[in-house]
Image (tube, grey):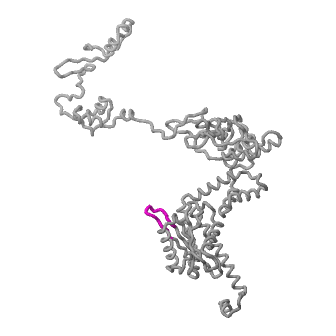
Amino acid sequence: MEENSSVSEHILKMSGLHGRLTSLGVELPDNKTTSFKKGKGKKNFKKDGKAVAAPGKPDAGKKKKNGPKPETECFYCKRLGHIGVKRMKKLHTDGLLESLDFESFDTCEPCLMGKMTKTPFSGIMERATDLLEIIHTDVCGPMNVEARGGIRLGKIPDQREPKRGRVCSLEKAMRNYVDRKSGQVVAPEIGREFDSLAEAFEFYNLYSWEIGFDIRYGQSRTNAQKSITVQDIVCGCAGRPKKENTKSVACNCQALIRLHRTNDNGWYIHDFRSEYNHHLASSCGEKLHWPSHRNIDTHNKDIVKHLRSNNIGLTKVFCVIGSFFGSMENVPFNKRSLNYMCKRMNQEAADDDIRKTVELFSELKKNDPMFADSVLVDSDSKIQALMWTNGKSRYQYRMFGDAITFDTTYRTNQYDMPFGLFVGVNHHFQSIILGGVMMRNEKEETFNWAFKEFVSLMGGKAPVTILTGVFCARMTSTQRSESANYMLKNFVHAGASMHMFVKHYQKLQFDRDSEENFAKKKSRLAGTVLKTGLPMERHAGKV
């Protein structure tokens, strides 16, 4: 750059535009010039005719001061490209930057403006599948507005509020069928509304029953608040089999109804497809084997639950249900469905069985202060044996505990554990239940523990005889144990869990107490019948 030349002139000359503009008669401004002289290790600059010191060099005769001048507080920050105080301190530590007075630095506003970032959006992003289905911005997040079809993008209730005078879809369909008098009773159509997904599923399920196919829930779409906005209910044969040469019923059937949300949090049919590519069931018995048509309603579930809890067999339960409907053909489900439901009930009862058993023992102790139990555990804290008895049995043992029998022939429970029953005989020649023990094995040490704990629970009094031969009460020990085994089978159903076994054992105990009370009443009110008439017999009859 030439001395005493204009800065703008120099720039134009460098770009080749100065000559062209001059030839066109354009007057170029010449109000700012810069001059400089070369010296030894020193450069003097002149700006607009005034001498300017080199950047970073203090004037001669003045004391050196660390940091920028007051009129240029952000000089070093600008010089280094707003790298920040931390990085300038690191450069100073590395010896690349002269000593600075960092504490005198003011806040650099360009640094703050340049480093500002937007607040991150923590919501869940989704790709829209319909026009204006999802509207969101990175600043505001998801907007709780209505899109096309009445879809709300915020939290949506699962069903809409009931309204007086609103007619349900099933009633509308039946009224329409009366007017048509042809076709299906339940016919899906686009625009039909429902209060909930469950109502829509039941409606479409009735239609599938008439046609002869199965349905299930398909794909769904949710918004940013995890509320379902679109739900497909598809044919049971939808999809493709995972591998070839399989028994899968999946054949890529396209039949479905697609549900969207209404403005009042309900549902309506947005799309309906009725094309099937598989065989349709024709008979009632064939339709009952589809999964969606073998559901058992709540009323029948309660009946089955009570019957099964009282040790009623599966076949008898199905016959009882059939008597309610008039005949077996009118039962709305099959025996296979009933069997599956009973297995699921047993599985639910077996969940957390030990905790339920402990809670049941606590309840029995609260109702009967004389109730006692004992547990044998192994080195891994697993239960090996469980024994219990109640106050009535302990009292009867003091009266009739001289001769008892013990047998473990009964083992019909969920864990296939032998159940030992201590049985005695009262003065009415009736079997009395003195206690029970459930064991995981029939080893010698387990039996030793069972006998010792039984004596301990009975107050420390050991029986005089544990009979294995002829029983004094007109019955052998085998007959006595078989009788107890028969009584247990009447009350405890096969596959019972541990806590359910204890509950059914209490029913057996109540049954035996009831029989004893009847014998007491009869012996006290009725006269004693003497067989021989001997004085000893007459004396015994008065005692």
> Picture quarter containing residue 207?
top right
Residue 217 appearing in the image? yes
**450 horizontally vs 163: left or right:** left
Locate residue 225, reporting x and y percent: 55, 43
Locate residue 488, reporting x and y percent: 63, 68
The verdict on residue 376 being magenta is yes
The residue sitting at 66% across, 36% down in the picture is 253
| Residues drawn in magenta | 374-385
Q: Looking at the image, which is closer to me, 413 or 45?
A: 413
The verdict on residue 502 being magenta is no
| Outermost residue to the top | 23
Locate residue 403, reporting x and y percent: 57, 79
| Outermost residue to the bottom | 535
Q: Quadrant of the C terminus?
A: bottom right
Q: Looking at the image, which is closer to me, 295 or 379?
A: 379
| Outermost residue to the front | 469
> Does 26 sit above or below residue 435?
above
Q: Quadrant of the N terminus?
A: top left
Q: Looking at the image, which is closer to me, 510 or 439?
A: 439
The residue sitting at 34% across, 14% down in the picture is 29
> Does 334 sit above or below residue 10?
below
The residue sitting at 74% across, 47% down in the picture is 285
> Picture quarter containing residue 131?
top right
Count of marks, rendered view: 0
Residue 230 appearing in the image? no
Locate residue 242, reporting x and y percent: 58, 37
Q: Looking at the image, which is closer to me, 457 or 400?
A: 400
**56 horizontally vs 154: left or right:** left
